[in-house]
């Protein structure tokens, strides 16, 4: 079987090459490794350059199979130069092929040795363009494709040499648009929030960009209220980084977006990391030494009382939190009509 696969990939006609690629996918891990040692990656990549979607799909699936359990094969594949043709496939009209291409990009980018080579081929810009098309036409790209695109970007962002190029790339503004247009509790938003938190915690310029982007604090507050537990953790982490970057500038903006109800709830009922970050952010928000608000001293005292109550009552329910917030606002609130009805407590 192995010999037939090799012969057909190197010397076979179209149908024989497609069948050989499909047979490769059915072989054991050891057999696939033997085939990689015999150089089958090269003809498979040549098949990607054809205009035949059936041949491309068979070859790409075979390449993905060769990566399973083998970092060496991931490196071999990238060194063989398939990234430009993979990026070009993102423009095709075949949804299944696009999904398979992005799955391959995600797998190949998971290998540390491949990250720079993949990024240097213009992958970040191509993925930004791909995601922008998804923003402009939400039904044009499948959810799986979006998730794999975000996961690939996350893999690349873990390389220190790549991080400096991310802030000026336009990536952050693109993925923020996806947040604005998606359900805050969705898996997509959770993955995007994780990517944003990683980038802004690794790059001061990226943090400055995200902090100064119009609407981002509002989006983080909404996500902190409506997202999944992990999503809420990312949101409060991003808000904490923003506030820490320039406390005098951003503390008031964060408070005015109605952060307190969600922040207080997270400080009691969030994940353990979310609780820690929520309480740290509360500490920054209660420090009003140079923050000019009317009646600021009573408000500082109230935050102090709230935090003491939180420390004393780990199982505090939301009703108690809302009652405490009504004291903060003297029972007044306003509604945000952009994303449904939700309470936004006034300062």
Image: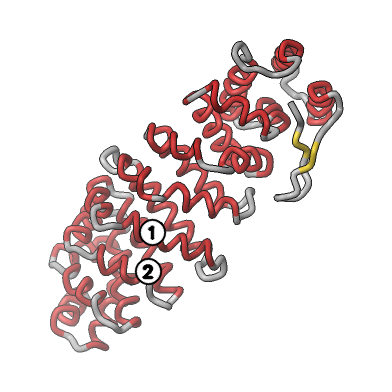
Frontmost residue, 327 versus 118: 327
Q: Is residue 294 visible?
A: yes
The answer to whether 239 appears left or right of 105 in the picture is right
> In the displayed structure, would residue 193 be above or below residue 60?
above
User: Which residue has dot 1 on it?
Assistant: 127
Q: Residue at x 40, y 57 (%)?
A: 128
CB under 8 Å between callouts 2 and 1?
Answer: yes
Vertical placement of residue 6 versus 305, above or below? below
| Mark 1 element type | helix
Query: Which percent across, then down, holds residue 77?
Result: 22, 61
Quarter holding the C terminus is: top right
Which of marks 1 and 2 precedes in the sequence?
2
Q: How far apart in space, not on screen, are marks 2 and 1 (Cα)?
A: 9 Å
Q: Which residue is mark 2?
A: 90
Toward the right, the furthest residue is 331
54 in relation to 120, above or below: below
Residue 82 sits in which quadrant? bottom left
Whole-percent x and y of residue 195?
Answer: 45, 44
Against 293, residue 85 (above or below) is: below
For residue 309, say whether it is visible: no
Camera-nearest residue between 16 and 312: 312
Quadrant of the frame with the N terminus: bottom left
Helix, strand or loop at disc 2? loop
Residue at 25% over, 65% down: 84
Residue at (52, 67) in percent of width and height: 142
How many numbered dots are placed on residues in this image?
2
């Amino acid at each position: 079987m192995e010999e037939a696969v090799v012969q057909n990939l190197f010397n076979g006609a179209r149908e024989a090459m497609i069948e050989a690629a499909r047979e490769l996918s059915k072989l054991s891990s050891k057999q696939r490794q033997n085939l990689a040692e015999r150089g089958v990656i090269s003809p498979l990549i040549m098949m990607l350059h054809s205009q035949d979607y059936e041949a491309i799909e068979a070859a790409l699936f075979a390449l993905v199979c060769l990566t399973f359990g083998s970092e060496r094969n991931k490196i071999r594949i990238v060194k063989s130069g398939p990234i430009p043709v993979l990026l070009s496939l993102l423009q095709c009209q075949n949804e299944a092929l696009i999904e398979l291409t992005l799955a391959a990009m995600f797998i190949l980018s998971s290998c540390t040795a491949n990250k720079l080579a993949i990024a240097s081929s213009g992958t970040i810009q191509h993925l930004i363009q791909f995601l922008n098309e998804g923003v402009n036409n939400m039904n044009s790209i499948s959810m799986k494709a979006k998730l794999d695109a975000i996961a690939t970007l996350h893999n690349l962002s873990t390389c220190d040499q790549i991080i400096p190029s991310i802030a000026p790339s336009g990536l952050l503004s693109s993925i923020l648009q996806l947040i604005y247009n998606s359900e805050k509790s969705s898996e997509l938003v959770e993955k995007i929030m994780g990517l944003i938190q990683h980038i802004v915690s690794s790059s001061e310029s990226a943090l400055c960009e995200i902090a100064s982007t119009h609407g981002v604090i509002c989006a983080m507050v909404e996500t902190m209220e409506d997202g999944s537990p992990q999503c809420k953790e990312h949101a409060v982490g991003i808000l904490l980084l923003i506030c820490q970057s320039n406390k005098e500038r951003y503390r008031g903006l964060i408070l005015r977006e109605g952060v307190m109800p969600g922040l207080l709830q997270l400080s009691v009922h969030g994940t353990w990391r979310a609780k820690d970050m929520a309480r740290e952010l509360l500490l920054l928000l209660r420090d009003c030494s140079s923050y000019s608000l009317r009646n600021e001293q009573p408000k500082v005292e109230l935050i102090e009382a709230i935090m003491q109550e939180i420390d004393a009552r780990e199982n505090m329910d939301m009703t108690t939190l809302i009652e405490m917030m009504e004291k903060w606002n003297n029972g007044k609130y306003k509604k945000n009509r952009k994303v449904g009805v939700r309470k936004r407590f006034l300062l």
